[in-house]
Amino acid sequence: MESLKKILLFFVVFFGVSAVFGQKITTQAIDKPAEGKSLVYILKTGAGMLLNFRIYDKDKFLGAIPSGKYLVYECEPGEHVFWATSENRDYVEANLEPNAVYVINAEGQMGAFIASVNLRPLKPMEFRDKKLFYQVVKNNTKIPYQPSQDDKSENIAKAMEKYQELKSKNSNKIAVLSSDMKFENADKPTK
């Protein structure tokens, strides 16, 4: 009888511990910017698993994002032009508020020779965008922005020339990240 109690106690403890550690993460804190700064998460999803999308803030090279990673960039609030390059270049105009967190997805798409990139600001009120942010933060590794010494001046000049050309034509190829598109967390969304 005593051994039966021990076996029963073992199973109760085992399944109790399994239940506690088997819980799925539903809430995830995100980094917050320093006082008076803005913070931008740049995710990498979609095609182009073997490519690193190169990300810029106007004339500043932020880094190359490999698959399974996301970039966290703290910056001054105000007007920004984020852009990414792969087989193509894609642009996002942003108006960032201080003490706020924003999310941009660098989504790989099938290109002619290699994957192209599509920059898309995520909207905190849309279920699919919240779900994507939750999954990337949960499953991928953060890369904090580190200033680079690489000379990207030629690439930057060409990209800014193309941006000005698109801007002068009022092109709809420039996405907009408005100041109200702030994320508070990376919690698992519920319908």
Image (cartoon, rainbow, N blue to C red):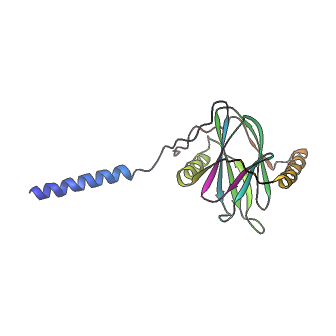
Name the residue: 24% across, 52% down. Answer: 12
Vertical position of residue 2 compared to residue 130: above or below: below
Count of picture labels: 0
Q: Who is closer to the viewer here, 35 or 167?
A: 35
Quadrant location of the N terminus in the rendered image: bottom left
The residue sitting at the left extreme is 1
Which quadrant would residue 94 be assigned to in this image?
Answer: top right
Q: Position of residue 121 (x, y in %)?
A: 70, 46
Q: Position of residue 152 (x, y in %)?
A: 81, 54
Q: Position of residue 135 (x, y in %)?
A: 55, 52
Which quadrant would residue 158 be assigned to in this image?
Answer: bottom right
Q: Position of residue 30 (x, y in %)?
A: 56, 41
Name the residue: 71% across, 61% down. Answer: 109
Q: Who is closer to the viewer here, 24 or 74?
A: 74
Name the residue: 70% across, 33% down. Answer: 97
Is 81 part of what is drawn in magenta? no
The residue sitting at the bottom extreme is 113
Vertical position of residue 31 compared to residue 24: above or below: above
Q: Who is closer to the viewer here, 186 or 64?
A: 64
**Horizontal relation, residue 186 to residue 81: left or right:** left
Q: Which residues are magenta?
A: 62-73
Which quadrant would residue 115 be assigned to in this image?
Answer: bottom right
Q: Main secondary structure of the magenta part?
A: strand
The residue sitting at the front extreme is 149
Is 72 part of what is drawn in magenta? yes
Name the residue: 86% across, 55% down. Answer: 154
Vertical position of residue 51 compared to residue 118: above or below: below
